[in-house]
Amino acid sequence: MPAALPVADDVLAAATRIAGHADLTPVLRSRTLDAMAGCQLLFKAEHLQRGGAFKFRGACNAVWSLSEAEAAHGVVTHSSGNHGAALALAARGRGIACHVVVPEGAVAAKLANIQRHGATLWRCEATQAAREATCAQVQQATGAQLVHPYADARVIAGQGTAALELAGQAGAPDVMVVPVGGGGLAAGTALALAAVAPDCGLVLAEPAGAADTARSLAAGERRIDFVPDTVCDGLRGALGAPNFELLRAAGAGVVVVDDDATIAAMRLAWQVLKQVVEPSSAIALAAVLAEPARFAGKRVGLVLSGGNVDLEALPWRA
Amino acid sequence: MPAALPVADDVLAAATRIAGHADLTPVLRSRTLDAMAGCQLLFKAEHLQRGGAFKFRGACNAVWSLSEAEAAHGVVTHSSGNHGAALALAARGRGIACHVVVPEGAVAAKLANIQRHGATLWRCEATQAAREATCAQVQQATGAQLVHPYADARVIAGQGTAALELAGQAGAPDVMVVPVGGGGLAAGTALALAAVAPDCGLVLAEPAGAADTARSLAAGERRIDFVPDTVCDGLRGALGAPNFELLRAAGAGVVVVDDDATIAAMRLAWQVLKQVVEPSSAIALAAVLAEPARFAGKRVGLVLSGGNVDLEALPWRA
């Protein structure tokens, strides 16, 4: 299943599948931020989603897509961030085992969060090869289904339900602006818009220090040879293959954002919107503020997330 | 009008009066906080209210209660905090002048916030006597109506609309827990509950370093001779006379909370609820966590505020 490309109908099916598990999060507005941005900002509050991020949608769709026989062996993934916590939470909701492969050096607080949801942690070296090898070992030993953080049709379709819901709650936006890392949310949003808002544009916000999507879409082929350097810890992954195909087909645009602008936008979100969001989602607001002419007067949908916030230090005071 | 005691119907009238000016704020929930507290927490998100606090409700009710002739001369108050900003915003909404008397030493950011809403600032010495004298001078010079931050029937009735709305949105709670400083929100909530949820209890959360309400209710008479010492900058004022009468009549209970517990609760609100709230409202969550037996299994309504948050330092890292 991970190899097949999902289609727009898969997002509609995912919405039905995860209803009753995922929360219907509110759409937040701010007169002050609208005035600053020169457009109407519609913030889909997925930092209030279970697990603190939209990632629960994709994880939940994957977990509840499994047959009884498949589910009996549990699920496995490699992610020390929001996807790991989301998959653990979704698996617990179905009462099945969850294995999470985490690299040495991962932040203790994040691992504690994953364990709190009942997952089993498997340590490995901090390389992509070690992650995948350990994942394969766990799969072989347990029969668990791999649920990749983003290069997975079920995950992509699940993430798309955030934009679907936003359009249902607030009406179709003129343009959606979402962060892009591996491309799960980005590709899912493209499918959701194809299903319910075909006239809505799609703009991706990408950190300058991990701008493989911008390079890939410009080149017309995946260019993922890079060493990430960005405060957006959720966006350091390389664009997935199915994600690239879907984003290319959708004609998505990209705004590349410096970390300074992302941190300034994050501060605005905290100060004005009063929402504790993480850099990996504040980058979407930064993208809108960076290109006012592009968004002037439009209804702009954004997806917030906040699972990976560190409250030990304020980034704008570092 | 400030001398008269408001009644329950005044809260219903205020709700009608401020509709279309004040925002209908959401009620937020958190499974994690519910599990920690052992009860169902219903957070009325007034930090998302215009101006960042429920104070806009009272200010708005006062401003729109004025006759055309009264309104022509504007309004005046003394408050460098949320009430000053709220009154400025409400006055601008009606297109009338707003004068705010601020003591020397008030935080520049807060004054800028009040000026941003179009109010005129009047400086005075940092004593209660100087504030009142300057207020009286401005009244005499301009004919402006005094809108006291809390000892005002219109303000009390307006603040009560937050609990009224909460009961309408989520059903009547078993108990409301609100912070108490001067007692505007506290007394207004008592009236709102009398109107629509007579079986709902009322518990006030008060800082140990400004516990005049606890002392006053215990003594059966107002005991307001104290020097405030608390991180809750919105709760340093002395309990107002009408506020005391209404709270005594309502049989309100008080939980006295140390600043350490308030800061811990504020951190929880940021980390788990993802909401940037100020100490002066986090104290209500702290009160619930401090007395689990009192709230066990109940539906507990709380009112959040967030106008006066300082994002230059994290209090739990001080």
Image (cartoon, coloured by chain):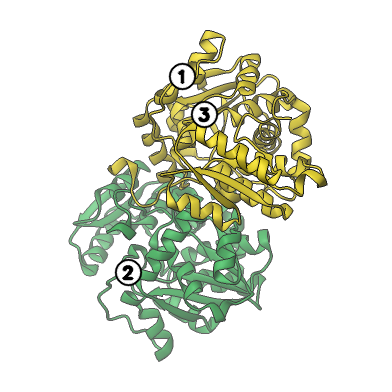
Chain colours: A green, B yellow
Q: Residue at x 33, y 63 (%)?
A: A233
Q: Which residue is mark 3?
A: B181
Q: Please report the residue visible at 49 percent of the width from the left and 55 percent of the height from the top.
A: B112
The residue to which callout 1 is attached is B225
Packing grade of label 3 (10 A; few <14, some 14-19, many >=20) is: many
Above-or-below relation of A181 to B195: below
Q: Nearer the viewer, mark 2 or mark 1?
A: 1
**Amino acid type shown at disc 1:** Asp
Alpha carbon of mark 3 to alpha carbon of mark 1: how far?
14 Å
Vertical comparison of B36 with B312: above or below: above
Q: Quadrant of residue A181?
A: bottom left
Query: Is the C terminus of chain B in the top left, top right, bottom left or bottom right quadrant?
Result: top left
Label 2, label 1: how far apart the Cα atoms are: 58 Å
Q: Which residue is mark 2?
A: A236
Determine if marks 3 and 1 fall on one subunit.
yes
In the rendered structure, the residue with mark 1 lies on which chain? B
Q: Position of residue B314 (x, y in %)?
A: 34, 46
Q: Nearer the viewer, mark 3 or mark 2?
A: 3
Q: Nearer the viewer, residue B311 or A99?
A: B311
Chain of the residue on which disc 2 is drawn: A
Q: Height in image: A180 above or below B95? A: below
Q: Residue furthest bottom?
A: A219
Instruction: Say whether residue A92 is left or right of residue B83.
Output: left
| Distance between the alpha carbons at the discs numbered 3 and 2 | 47 Å
Secondary structure type for disc 3: loop
Examine the rendering and report whether any part of residue B44 can be seen: no
Q: Position of residue A290 (x, y in %)?
A: 47, 76
Q: Amino acid at mark 2?
A: Arg
